[in-house]
Amino acid sequence: MTTTETAAPYVLEAEDVAVHYGGIKAVDGFGLRLPPGKIYGILGPNGSGKSTFLAAVTRLVPLTRGRLLLDGKEYHSEPPMKLARKGLARTFQTVRLLPELTVLQNVQLGADINDPRGRLRSWLGRDRPSEAVEEAIERTGLGDVRNAWPTELSYGMARRVEIARALAARPRLLLLDEPTAGMNHSERQEVSELMQKLRDEGLAQLIVEHDVQMMVDTCDHLVAMNFGSLVAEGSPQEVVSHPAVQEAYLGKRWRSHA
Amino acid sequence: MIGWYEANIVLIEATFLNFLLALSIQVPLRVGVFSFAGVGSYGLGAYTAAILTIRYDVPAFVAIGAAVVFASVVGYLFSLIVARLNGLYLAMATIAFVLIISVLATNGGELTGGANGLYGALSDLTTGGVVAVCVVVAFLLALTERGPLRRRIEAVREDPELSMSMGIGVVTVRQLAFTVSGALGACAGAMNALLRTTVSPEEINFHLIVLALTMVIIGGSRSWMGAFIGAVIFTWLPSMLATTGRWQDVVYGLIIILAAIFMPTGLLGLVQSLYQKLRGRSRTAAPAEPPAEEAVEERAMLQALSGESKEGVR
Amino acid sequence: MEILINAVTLGSLYLLFALGMSVAWGTIGILNFAHGSTFMFSAMVAYYTVQMVALPMWAMILLGAAVGMVLSVLTQALIFNFILRRNPDLLKAEMQIVVGGIGAASVLLAIAQHYTKSVPFGFSASTFKTTTYQLGAIHISNVQLVILVAAFGLAGLAAWWLKSARAGLALRAIGVNPEVASLMGVDRGRMALGTMAAAGALAGTAGILLTYYLGSIAAETGDSFLISAFAAIILGGIGSVIGVVVGSMILALAETLVVTQLSGTWASAVAFGLIFVVLLFLPRGIFGRKEVRRT
Amino acid sequence: MLEIRDLHVSYGKIEAVRGVSASASPGRITLVLGANGAGKTTTLRAAMGLLPVRSGEVLLDGKPITGRPTHRIVRDGLVLVPEGRQVFAPLTVEENLILGGYTVSKEKAAETMEQVYEMFPILKERRNGPAGLLSGGEQQMLAFGRALMSSPRAMMLDEPSMGLAPTMVESVLSSVRSIADSGIALLMVEQNAEMGLEIADDVVVVARGEVVFSGPAEQARQNSSVVRAFLGEAALSS
Amino acid sequence: ACGTNEAGESSSTGEGLPDTIKIMSIKEMTGPVSFAGENSTKGIDLAVEQINEQGFLGDTKLEIDLKDASDSTQEAASLATQAVSDKSYSAILGPGLSSQASAISPIAEKGEIPVIYYQAGSDGVLVGDYTYRVTAPAASYYHIIGDYLAEKKVKTAAVLYTSGNPTLTELGEKAVPGVIEENGVTIKRSDTVSNDTQDFTAVTSEIIKADPDAVFLLLLGPQNPRAVSQLKQKGYDGEIIGMTTMGAGNLETAGEDAAGVVWPSNFSARSEVPSTQEFVKAYEEKYGELPNNYAAEGYDAVWLLARGIKEANSADRVAIREGIAKVAAEGFDGAQGPLSFENNDVRVEGVIASWNGSEEVVVTLGDD
Ligand SMILES: Nc1ncnc2c1ncn2[C@@H]1O[C@H](COP(=O)(O)OP(=O)(O)OP(=O)(O)O)[C@@H](O)[C@H]1O
Ligand SMILES: Nc1ncnc2c1ncn2[C@@H]1O[C@H](COP(=O)(O)OP(=O)(O)OP(=O)(O)O)[C@@H](O)[C@H]1O
Ligand SMILES: CC(C)C[C@H](N)C(=O)O
Ligand SMILES: [Mg+2]
Ligand SMILES: [Mg+2]
């Protein structure tokens, strides 16, 4: 295997991905191509298979069918932990913090991936948070709760820790499943700004989110799915004005706005 | 002092052996693996060491070393077999493992001495040797209770799937836990067999499992110190209670009940939280500061709502 | 054929014993390690009573069930309840509950050992006399018949109740998430007490019937039944009544076959080996519920 | 009529709720707004008896329910749709609904169940599948439907639209409105302020555990700071 | 350096006997075998009382320090270590559990303190010179059942034993089949159960199918009444022959079902041997009940020790050991009848005991 150092045109490619649970076809022939340094968004009604697609991409559920490529290399038979080492990080739709670690330690866990064996120094001596950790805490506004325990956080705060943990890994590709659920407008705005800043720094992102306004403002490209398959794809404006999307997803309110 | 030491040498040694036994349950528990296989390894180790000593008259460290290696390998292979099991189903499979080892020992004919067990395993193992092994083990485990290793262990226990997505080899960690548990259990069993010079199949029973679990839960399940505290309590408690005469077992049970109720994080957890209270540092961060009363209503509200003044959030 | 009947009887005994434990565990999430001691203690109280007044079998069963119920309720009210109150998360409290149960078991066992000196006791003073009927080549005793009827009857009742009664559903909900169950209006404390009372009554009944059947039991008998019951529940799958039935029967059949056809020494090795193998292929027991967890 | 009066709730030394008052009358919706960590969830949970109340009162139809056990409060006619859905994952969808109707008669429950199925057809489709396998939004529908099952007199909702697709938000919130119209008192925490304000009658804004605004929804919509904080600058200029 | 003075002249040498001699008694007073500890302690107390009252050791009094080790091996070993290091103890009266005894023996040998065990029937319990046992292995007297087999015209037999226990395994695999075959009886079946077997229906059904004239049950105490009842209930009406675990009231719960069960025993309160009757009388007087084998063994253990002390005329441990060795070489009459010793292990003549449905009696052959 020789690695020709030509940058692949896409960070992530998913082709014809299907995930079936018995008769339930959670994802059924969906795919997308995410170029580096772009934010792509997935829209779709509840139960359309968005989270399942993310789980498939991160190898947490087995593929029924399909092909997955990271930087042009197939990875759909590799175990999930290898992906993190290749620069892929994600958050989950539900809050999944470790209850016996403080906010800071939860974030540090994210950064540990870049230090796979763990420096001997940090076993024996002090375990100072690395630059990446401090930066992630800073950017998500968690400075004041860095020493709090997860159970003491409000829902919205807990979500930010999830994002910080993913950022601390300094990933090249970030997958976010409803990162702003439970936040109010101005809080969402902050998250949106953060994501755009990260994009400008070169981080490719794939976001699942139901706040359409935010998605339109944030994403470079939208993909709409329903019943596990693709419905529409294109620039945010194109997608939100697509009749099928309006019908199945946006409802009358958005239609009147747009 | 010397007199006390000599008179209680058996209990002092037993404390350290129970410490290792407790650790053999605690190590897998810390990574979320509910396995009692360590108690089976205790039996494997005891028999291996006794057989080597009686038949081949090898030095103690060789006998113990061989026992540890053998049980580690068995522990590793066992982890491959039970890879799909979890929770109490796994616990049951490991209990079966322990009981099967006991039955094998009973039916092992000449090799294991049958129901009689083996006796006359005289060796050169000293109390100092036992303590030295325990100190090394405790030091190594202490390293896993801080920094990045601690975080990884926490992650694997609480949320294996999350761990995988963060690049932690959950399967490897699990296998490692079984292997280490095997080594620790075997080490305890081997040293016990050599110090007591005997081993018999009745020793490896359900009660040993219960004892190991109780030591860990009541001592504390997150740190080697918890295991040590548990070992001290459950080694010395019976002789302390002997003065209560006929009702000693009842008192023993009552103490376990009270500990289960009032020490949800084990004695270690209790001590730690007391210590933190004393130092005035609660588990929480600084309390929220009082609201700025005099602030102009409109402005204060705006800030608070928009989340601009984050220092107020906590 | 007679082997089969004997095996089914032994299985029914396991079932009677394990049923209460399984229901409490599968619903309100309480794995009661004092169940074995409760069972033995009920039989012991009945024994001391029958030494004073010769009672018929039905009265003995009622007595045993009552004692079991009281003990079980006390364990719940004085131990498990306190643990849960201090640690509302059921999963986190699980270990504490196991250890608390171990403590309660050792108290009951110690008291029983103190009074009986571990000498076996039986109900020869009861007015009930065992008679054996012969049907062709098969011997079957009236105790066996009672046991078979009681075990299958009670298991059927439990299964129906859990499945179709609203209260049964509420119990299962408590096992999943006690706090949300209370948000549905379920009185967690009372339901838990009720369940433990029923489980205790089952343990007491099993204790009495077992003593009639074996002729005698000793203080330590509860312990060995505890492991078998635990094994039967796991084999069948936690939380499934049909699972306990099948688990108990398989375990009993395996043990019986080994004892009669091979050698009693290997009985527990084969039985546990079997459980081990079954779990390797069915990691959640035969009828165990799949874990509902998703990303 | 649901009334929360000067409620104080602490976690250890930290006082998370410091004198929150809010009320909802039958047929009306009171919207509770506030930043993350403001103490909204804490308020609802304390009112429901899930957290100990330091001081203050909760009244249902004038009768104090403070300090009563949660299951009693439910019987008294107050329910909570908890934050983060909290469905009984291993139980089926239908079993979840049956549990919702635990405190009412079987006939009444069966009747309400039909209405819930009508409101959310996907639930009917999945009635015999485990609730835990539903998607996030589907679970939110179930949680909402489950609360309706007890035919409550007053209902508290903690972020009912969280994780719902826009069409679903619309339908959930419009069913919230029609529930209120049927004579139930509703207290709702909602981050989707735009839509929340549209259906709400009254608004309470909480910051750092205290009420900083309380008044009719109309007034809130005109209050520039509230609008800016929750709807963004765009809403002001339009 | 120990003067072996004649008995009685206790203080004639420089060493002589102190006012009291302290002995540690490690017993299982609680836990699953407390019945053995309780009863042996009664026998011990009776013997000590007699020795002290009679002035058997002159003015010297024996003092027993009773320690409860329950069923914990570690506790027993620890107590033995304490006895070794506390020089005020002259000897140990050991526990009945083999597992505890095997752990104590090496400690005693190394610490040079004499130990006298009862029960503890495993191999490997007696090591070196310091350990003695006053319970004869059942195998050593089991042959007395031979005449009974002949009298009852037993031709075929089945054996059922508990394989988890060393003593019972030894009996079931070697000694009993040996005795049976010597008497011209053929073994039709041999089955095993484990320590925690509760239900015997299956195995008894199989045994009955084989239709033997006699069934040998070599089981743990609590297992006996169950196996007997279940055999009887399945319609078995042949001979049932057991071992000492049938004694000590263990058959009581089987009631009538157990009537006629016999077993060779090292002791029976109904035995007519004079030294036994003497003991039984004293025991009944003190406790108002008949002694069982554990009591007799405890009693004999103390007397062996006291005789050894008297022989040694010293409270010194090494001297006492030598004294015991002398006594053992000669033998003496104890509660269990005439006792002799073989490699520190006692030998008795044995009796055939029987349960008549309500109490234990002695079987005398030939007169019916
Ligand atoms: N493990 C599973 N077993 C069975 N069905 C599943 C499983 N996981 C998901 N599903 C089903 O697959 C469908 C897609 O679920 P998914 O969680 O991917 O939806 P989603 O698009 O993320 O929805 P939402 O926006 O509500 O989060 C749903 O109908 C869900 O019930
Ligand atoms: N168990 C707890 N222990 C200690 N502090 C807690 C606990 N739960 C919540 N808090 C703190 O109490 C405050 C209020 O939390 P609450 O969950 O009520 O906020 P919220 O308004 O619902 O926020 P969100 O919109 O993010 O859900 C927060 O500062 C939070 O950190
Ligand atoms: C106390 C006795 C019942 C002990 C048993 N006979 C043994 O050798 O272990
Ligand atoms: Mg989703
Ligand atoms: Mg909240």
Image (cartoon, coloured by chain):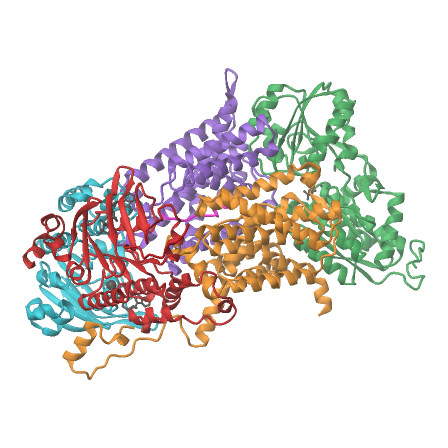
- State the purple chain: C
Q: Quadrant of residue D22?
A: bottom left
Vertical relation: B228 (above or below) E353: below
Vertical relation: C118 (above or below) B27: above
Image quadrant where one finds the C terminus of chain B: bottom left
- Can you name the residue that lies furthest to the top here? C136
The number of numbered badges drawn on the structure is: 0
Q: Is residue C11 left or right of residue E102?
A: left
- State the green chain: E
Q: Is residue C32 magenta?
A: yes
Q: Quadrant of residue B125?
A: bottom right
Q: Is residue E135 left or right of residue C182?
A: right
Look at the magenta stretch and give its main secondary structure.
loop
Question: In terms of depth relative to the viewer, which is nearer, E173 or C119?
Answer: E173
Residue at 87%, 43% (x, y): give it. Answer: E331
Question: In terms of depth relative to the viewer, which is nearer, E67 or C18?
Answer: C18
| Percent of width and height locating residue B309 | 24, 76
Q: Is residue A222 left or right of residue B265?
A: left
Q: Quadrant of residue E204?
A: top right
- State the cyan chain: D
Q: Which residues are magenta?
A: C28-37
* Residue E201 seen in render: yes
Q: Is residue B44 magenta?
A: no
Residue at 67%, 45% (x, y): give it. Answer: B200
| Percent of width and height locating residue B9 | 69, 61
Question: In terms of depth relative to the viewer, which is nearer, D213 or A9?
Answer: A9
| Percent of width and height locating residue D187 | 16, 61
What colour is chain B?
A: orange
What colour is chain A?
A: red
